[in-house]
Image (cartoon, coloured by chain):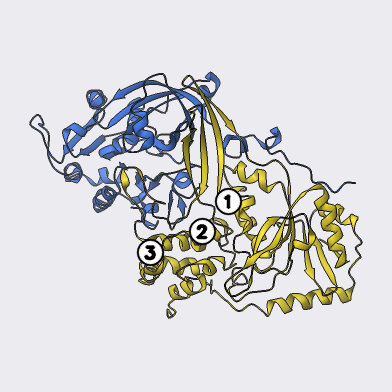
Chain colours: A yellow, B blue
């Protein structure tokens, strides 16, 4: 691993050089919420001043850039009862992500495991993922962030370079050759021992700010034991079954496929749409039988997939602890509360 | 040097080789033709589907119990168990009940239409492991559709199996599938035990539940029979518990009972999660599971 240091003003130069040749996506303020706090979104940017690297968690994850909510898997031309299928992976150029938090980088790493590094890798994801250049950046922990419990408060890989704010300078960790070459365009220096100390101070300062926690000890077994527990019914009664949690989740990848015929009957489309296991039709089969007809069974399934099934398959949870689901939930259901209750804690 | 990112083209040949790792096969469909459409009952039709490209046809093989995705462009794509003999390459038979968009559309199109197929996907019944054993092939209703593939295997390899029993139950005689094959199955020394829940005037066979027939076959046997018997069970989820619990009472180990679970896959490749049971992908670890595994899955049946 290579470390460098550069003055803060250099970041603007780096952005401008990169933006001159590439499409850049970064966190920008899109408006204010009812309490007058800024709402951040990931958006395409060409002006460095629009980017706010001190942003707090965006409402929506960056997933629309690599797992769009809707995309065509294929299109058909239909002529005289015959058809021709065309497959397009829906990506035409690389994207630079300027300032992803560790949770969102870890989300990508988790998605990679199931969508890239397992049997039948998914080309629609692969095509976009292979065309991403990621600049990571540290965050300011929010009261709802429990990433530290999920082991995703730091990113070990899955980015090209990662910058940490040291006050007047940025400390940069370089993982790829591409990033190394990009950095040749700005003035950087070798960090000295005192910079290392500053870095460690910055890291521990950030660590001390985490407040939300989830106890994941033996969670896979506990979830198994508590499968019939009444706490699921409690949360099921609150849950509206709206699927917002999946929509804002950086790791939810479940989907459905539908086909439609064009209005002129000369073409057809096969469309993939992200789905949510909390929606009523998720586990319905032909003839109308539904394997998870009640809201509590669907909510429970979501926790089982994230915190048990994925762990069984990949030795880690499918939750990065970003807290977006809890923040967006209309019924105010949060992961730390649900898991604490499954572990026998009192429900507030 | 210009700091411009190079576009990575994932379709280049170095990134495509084996089907399970091959990025380009993900959405690839074999173009296939409905070479025969045979109506079995009011609701079910048997479609014979042949892959058009001779090279693809030669390479297409499957194991009984596996499923494939059948696509009609613009109408939809859905998973179906294969109902035909595994020794025929590049051609499959699917027994399909009218129940949704795609299947209703299929019931209207005739011979000669072109469809797309992907697969085969999932696990199959370990028939070679069952060589030298007695077989109980238990089917409820449409469950005979996936069971017809292992039946065909048994017919073609009859000498490798000892006593073979088909236990098949439906609601009424009008629902019976593949009636034209019963004679041949019997002639291949496969005992056919058919039972219906409600008889009609023409019905001369037994009336009752499938488990009644099963109980008769299992009762009063030597221990040797129970120790050397495998069971394959296909049908509606409620049936599994009754059948498998009965088999278990006669000390047939759960690991020698195989069931096929029905779920609505949207991809067949362990991505869409629609077929997940607990957190197991039915499309990758199933649809064929031994009953021990099913007992350990949450909400499987």
Q: Which residue is mark 3?
A: A296
Give x and y (percent) for residue B253: 32, 50
Q: Residues within 10 Å of mark 3 (few under 14, many from 20)?
A: many
Disc 3 element: helix
Q: Which residue is mark 2?
A: A246
- Give the answer, above or below, for where B200 lies relative to A317: above
Q: Which residue is mark 1?
A: A114
Q: Are marks 3 and 2 in contact (CB under 8 Å)?
A: no
Q: Residue at x 62, y 47 (%)?
A: A116
Q: Residues within 10 Å of mark 1 (few under 14, many from 20)?
A: some
Label 3 chain ID: A
Give x and y (percent) for residue A339: 48, 72
Q: Nearer the viewer, mark 3 or mark 1?
A: 3
Q: Quadrant of residue B278?
A: bottom left
Going from N to C along the chain, the mark reached first, 2 or 1, is 1
**Left or right: A342, with A250 as reference point:** left
Q: State the separation of the CA atoms marked 3 and 1.
A: 26 Å
Q: State the separation of the CA atoms marked 2 and 1.
A: 17 Å
């Amino acid at each position: 691993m290579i470390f460098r240091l550069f003055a803060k003003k250099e970041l603007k130069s780096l952005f401008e050089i990169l933006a001159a040749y590439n499409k850049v996506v970064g966190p920008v303020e899109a408006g204010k919420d009812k309490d007058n706090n800024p709402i951040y979104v990931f958006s395409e940017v060409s002006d460095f001043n629009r980017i706010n690297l001190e942003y707090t968690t965006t409402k929506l994850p960056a997933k629309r850039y690599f797992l769009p909510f809707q995309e065509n898997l294929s299109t058909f031309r239909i002529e005289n009862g015959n058809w021709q299928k065309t497959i397009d992976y829906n990506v035409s150029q690389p994207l630079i992500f300027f300032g992803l938090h560790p949770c969102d980088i870890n989300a990508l790493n988790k998605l990679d495991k199931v969508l890239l590094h397992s049997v039948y890798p998914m080309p629609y994801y692969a095509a976009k993922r292979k065309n991403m250049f990621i600049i990571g950046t540290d965050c300011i922990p929010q009261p709802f962030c429990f990433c530290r419990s999920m082991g995703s408060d730091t990113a070990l890989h899955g980015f090209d370079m990662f910058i940490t704010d040291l006050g007047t300078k940025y400390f940069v960790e370089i993982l790829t050759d591409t990033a190394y070459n990009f950095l040749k365009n700005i003035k950087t220096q070798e960090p000295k021992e005192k910079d290392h100390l500053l870095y460690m101070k910055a890291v521990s300062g950030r660590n001390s700010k985490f407040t939300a926690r989830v106890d994941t000890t033996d969670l896979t077994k506990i979830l198994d034991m508590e499968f019939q527990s009444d706490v699921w019914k409690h949360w099921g009664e609150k849950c509206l079954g709206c699927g917002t949690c999946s929509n804002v989740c950086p790791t939810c990848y479940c989907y459905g496929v539908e086909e439609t015929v064009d209005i002129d009957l000369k073409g057809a489309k096969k469309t993939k749409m992200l789905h949510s296991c909390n929606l009523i039709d998720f586990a319905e089969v032909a003839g109308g039988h539904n394997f998870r007809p009640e809201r509590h069974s669907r909510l429970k399934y979501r926790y089982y997939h994230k915190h048990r099934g994925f762990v069984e398959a990949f030795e880690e949870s499918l939750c990065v602890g970003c807290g977006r689901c809890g923040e967006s939930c209309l019924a105010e259901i949060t992961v730390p509360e649900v898991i604490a209750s499954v572990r026998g804690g009192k429900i507030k | 040097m210009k700091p411009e990112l190079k576009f990575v083209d994932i379709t280049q040949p170095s990134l495509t080789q084996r089907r399970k790792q091959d990025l380009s096969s993900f959405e690839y469909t074999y173009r296939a033709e409905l070479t025969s459409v045979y109506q079995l009952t009011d609701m079910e039709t048997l479609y014979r589907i042949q892959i058009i490209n001779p090279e693809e046809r030669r390479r297409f093989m499957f194991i009984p119990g596996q499923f494939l995705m059948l696509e009609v462009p613009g109408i939809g794509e859905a998973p179906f168990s294969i109902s035909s003999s595994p020794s025929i390459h590049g051609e499959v038979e699917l027994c399909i009940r009218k129940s949704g968009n795609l299947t209703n559309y299929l019931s209207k199109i005739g011979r000669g239409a072109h469809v797309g197929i992907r697969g085969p996907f999932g696990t199959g019944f370990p028939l070679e492991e069952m060589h030298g054993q007695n077989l109980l092939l238990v089917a409820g209703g449409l469950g005979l559709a996936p069971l017809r593939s292992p039946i065909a295997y048994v017919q073609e390899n009859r000498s490798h199996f000892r006593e073979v029993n088909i236990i098949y139950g439906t609601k009424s005689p009008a629902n019976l599938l593949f009636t034209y094959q019963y004679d041949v199955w019997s002639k291949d020394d496969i005992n056919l035990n058919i039972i219906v829940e409600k008889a009609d005037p023409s019905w001369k066979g037994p009336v009752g539940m499938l488990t009644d027939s099963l109980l008769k076959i299992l009762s009063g046997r030597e221990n040797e029979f129970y120790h050397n018997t495998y069971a394959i069970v296909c049908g509606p989820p409620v049936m599994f518990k009754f059948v498998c619990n009965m088999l278990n009472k006669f000390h047939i180990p759960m690991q020698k009972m195989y069931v096929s679970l029905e779920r609505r896959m949207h991809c067949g490749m362990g991505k869409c999660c629609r077929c997940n049971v607990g957190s197991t992908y039915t499309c990758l670890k199933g649809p064929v599971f031994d009953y021990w595994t099913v007992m350990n899955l949450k909400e499987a049946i």
